[in-house]
Image (spheres, grey):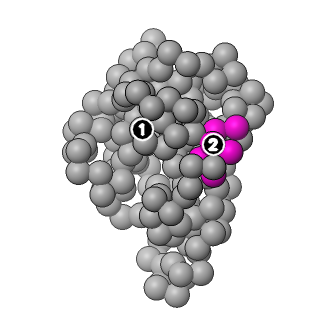
Amino acid sequence: MPRPTRAELAAANDRTIADVLGPGLEVLFCGINPSLYSGATGHHFARPGNRFWPALHLSGFTPRLLAPHEQHLLPDHGLGITNLVARATARADELDDHELKVGGDRLRGLVAEYAPKVVAVVGITAYRTAFTAPKAVVGPQAELVESVRVWVLPNPSGLNAHYQLDDLAAEFGHLRASLG
């Protein structure tokens, strides 16, 4: 896939990308919002340096490393992707608390419709805001969303220096192991 130009990245501001959904999902991954890179390409977690796809593979969710343009294959593995906020921004801190809370309500609707076994929110700070859970930590949550288990994972952005790829893969692996 060719890299977007600066002009294409700028034009992607506020663009939305389609959710990746299907019947019988084991896990619905929910990001914070698309990056400009994702908005320009139309693919989730597409920015170079984002570690979502490698962590997904290293944790055993996929038999091989998928590229962002292969996101359409996820439902074949029982996986889906959405975002709390649909609009693309340069940085997640451009979102306000109201947008995240509205996104939490939207996520509840998707969970009710698709009934995954687990919803995994990728980004603890966004989860805390969207679901008014200021003390939430990475891992399984006590709160259910529409009777579905919730798991919080670290943000896989390359900007998240608290988690290296092996640490992210381990957290994704804990979720995978919980599925039985």
Which label number is shown at residue 172?
none
Q: Nearer the viewer, residue 36 or 80?
A: 36
Residue 159 visible from this viewpoint = yes
Residue projecting furthest to the bottom: 7
Magenta segment includes 119 = no
Q: Mark 2 or 1 closer to N-term?
A: 2
Find disc 1 in the rendering and name its residue.
Answer: 124
Which three-letter amino acid code belongs to the residue tagged 2? Lys
Find disc 2 in the rendering and name its residue.
Answer: 101
State which mark lies toward you, 2 or 1.
2
Residue at image position (75%, 34%) is 109
Q: Which residues are the magenta region?
A: 99-105
Which three-letter amino acid code belongs to the residue tagged 1? Ile
Residue 157 position in % (x across, y down): 36, 54
In the image: residue 168, left or right of residue 18? left
Numbered disc 2: secondary structure: helix
Displayed quadrant of residue 137: top left
